[in-house]
Image (cartoon, rainbow, N blue to C red):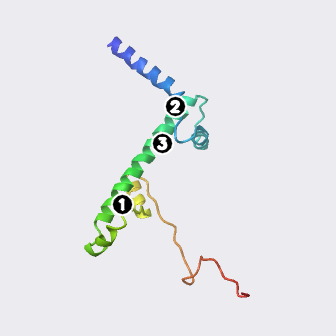
Amino acid sequence: MAESKQDDDAVLIEFLSSLMDYTPTIPDELAEYYLSKSGFQCPDVRIIRMVSIATQKFIAEIASDAFQLCKARQSAVNKEKRDKQQKDKSLVLTTEDLSMALREYGVNMKRQEYFADNPSAGTNPTSKDE
């Protein structure tokens, strides 16, 4: 039992030392900023990098799930459109795909309502002087 604890301690020490050489995708400054906004203060860079790695994994899982939902949605397209899609095999990730993936993780995303007086609202206005 004592030997197992020493092995665990050795693995932990090795992992923590490897964090000093690893540069996460999410910069330390960004992770530290959001951690401080939530009230977490820690001078140890290794802890902040562990949070960055966990965040990176979380985002990667959401992106992967959204991608799977996107592929499933586009494979369900009726046969007429499927023939046209054979030429263009690019996948289009929609907000609905992302929203469904986030919902699986307990994050509810709502699109902001958009109101327009006329169909050209929100486009570049053309000058009447021209």
| In this view, 100 is above or below 114 | above
Mark 3 neighbour class, 10 Å CA radius: few under 14, some 14 to 19, many 20 or more? some
Mark 2 neighbour class, 10 Å CA radius: few under 14, some 14 to 19, many 20 or more? few
Question: Residue 20's quadrant in the figure?
Answer: top right
| In this view, 110 is above or below 123 | above
Question: Residue 12's quadrant in the figure?
Answer: top left
Q: Amino acid at mark 1?
A: Cys
What residue is shown at x 38% (from left), y 59% (from top)? Answer: 100
Q: Position of residue 78 (x, y in %)?
A: 27, 72
Q: CA distance from mark 2 to mark 3?
A: 15 Å
Mark 1 neighbour class, 10 Å CA radius: few under 14, some 14 to 19, many 20 or more? many
Residue occupied by mark 2: 22
Q: Helix or strand or loop: what does disc 2 sit on? A: loop
Q: Nearer the viewer, residue 80 or 113?
A: 80
Q: Helix or strand or loop: what does disc 1 sit on? A: helix
Query: Are the residues at dot 2 and dot 3 in contact (C-beta closer than 8 Å)?
Result: no
Q: Amino acid at mark 3?
A: Thr
Q: Nearer the viewer, residue 13 or 38?
A: 13
Of the numbered discs 2 and 3, the one sitting upstream in the chain is 2
What residue is shown at x 60% (from left), y 77% (from top)? Answer: 123
Residue occupied by mark 1: 70
Q: CA distance from mark 2 to mark 1?
A: 32 Å
Q: Helix or strand or loop: what does disc 3 sit on? A: helix
Query: Are the residues at dot 2 and dot 1 in contact (C-beta closer than 8 Å)?
Result: no
Q: Amino acid at mark 2?
A: Tyr
Q: Position of residue 91 (x, y in %)?
A: 39, 61
Judge left or right: residue 26 versus residue 1.
right
Residue occupied by mark 3: 55
Q: CA distance from mark 3 to mark 1?
A: 22 Å
Question: Residue 90's quadrant in the figure?
Answer: bottom left
Q: Position of residue 15 (x, y in %)?
A: 45, 25
Quadrant into which the N terminus falls: top left
